[in-house]
Image (cartoon, helix red, strand yellow):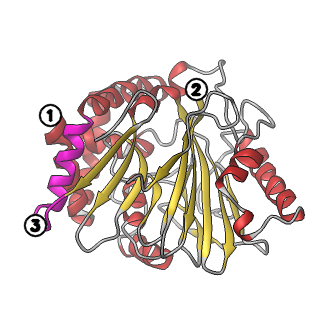
Amino acid sequence: MTTNDMDPIKLTLRGSPRETHGQIGLQHGRALRDQIRSQIGIYDTMFQHTSKLSWPEVRAVAKEFQPSLQELVPDIYTEMQGVADGADLDILDIVALNCRSEIALGKFSDGCTTLSWKKSDETRILSQNWDWTATVKKNLAMVSIEQAGKPTIYMVAEAGIVGKIGFNSAGVGTCLNAIRAKPMISSKLPIHVALRLCLESISVNDAVQTLESLGGVASAQHILVADSTKALGLELSPVGNIYLAEDASGLIPHSNHFIENSYVDEPLWLLGSPIRLARIKYLAQELISHGVHGDTITPALLREKIFSDTYNAPQAICCQEDESRHISTRSSSLFNIVMDLNSKNPSAEVVFGRVGSGEEGPVLKMPWV
């Protein structure tokens, strides 16, 4: 684990083939013990405010997910147990963190804006601003996971959570948009586990096949997944999925509402979501009209021209805190990631903070070694 005053934690996790997942979890729990405990405190406060659930009650809901995790993803469950052991916590604390998007039925205010852009027939750019309460920023880590027989994962993750936003050495990347919709079915995969499974895949098709073969996800969410030759917007729900293909310009933009999936009851919960979606489409088409394509689609350009955009603030692509909301549910853009997905040398640039604000951190590289 490495860090300094300016950089987030950088954590490399690896295990021997025989004990891979248990060792990876144990390393995670030991290295991020303080951050995991801080996350539990943050979500305890948030659950009480949004759902009137105390942490013991949250753990009771998490227990509903335990049998399906043990059955569907035993290796990942073993990793969660290792995280719990390393942090000296109960397994249900870690299950609760990894099911936090499902437990409160989406009663959070996390809004994110994502974009996939076809750079060439052999490369996709995958990017997003991740918006969430600023209280968790100190508990984010840049994590790499090395597993025998699987691609190496590079992701930005919350402490204690096993899957998030990032890419792997096979050139498969993931972004996430929260959706608020019913129902939630605890016998299916929590979305953060689904993200981890995507990041263990060797292609978009492999990721989709894995999720389908395991019975799908527990709550409505959108995963934008891409590899070097294909991108799909996975509008997922426990009662039916819709997959969005690239448009004629090679784009898949998304925000925090379903575009085509009508299987679930989804009242509009973030008024700025349709505005952000229209805005990112407009900004991308503006760049295309000015001749931006191929190698001119750079992380710096996307940060400057798209992800720093403050139109319709505070619910902008570059999200600002809304001071009218309770402190535990005020969202702002905590980091931006731009992934260059190619099968030979996938990489990413990450900037923590609100890009274009003048207060963001330096440009960080993944892989960082």
User: Could you say whether the residue bearing mark 1 is in a helix, strand or loop?
Assistant: loop
Q: Quadrant of the N terminus?
A: top left
Going by the numbered disc 3, the residue's amino acid type is: Arg
- The residue segment tinted magenta is 15-32
Crowding at mark 3 (Cα within 10 Å: few <14, some 14-19, many 20+):
few
Residue 22 within the magenta-colored segment of the rendering: yes
Of 218 and 88, nearer the camera is 88
Q: Local crowd at mark 1 within 10 Å, few (<14), some, or many (≥20)?
A: some
How far separated are the C-alphas under marks 1 and 2?
30 Å
Q: Residue at x 39, y 33 (%)?
A: 139
Q: In screen coordinates, is 107 left or right of 258?
A: left
Q: Is residue 221 magenta?
A: no
- Residue farthest toward the front in the current orientation of the protein: 369
Q: Position of residue 106 (x, y in %)?
A: 51, 42
Q: Which residue was labeled with disc 1?
A: 88
267 and 216: which one is in front?
216
Measured as percent of width and height from the top left, residue 165 is found at: 48, 53
Q: Which residue is mark 2?
A: 330
**Residue where numbered disc 3 is placed:** 18
Name the amino acid type tagged 1. Answer: Asp
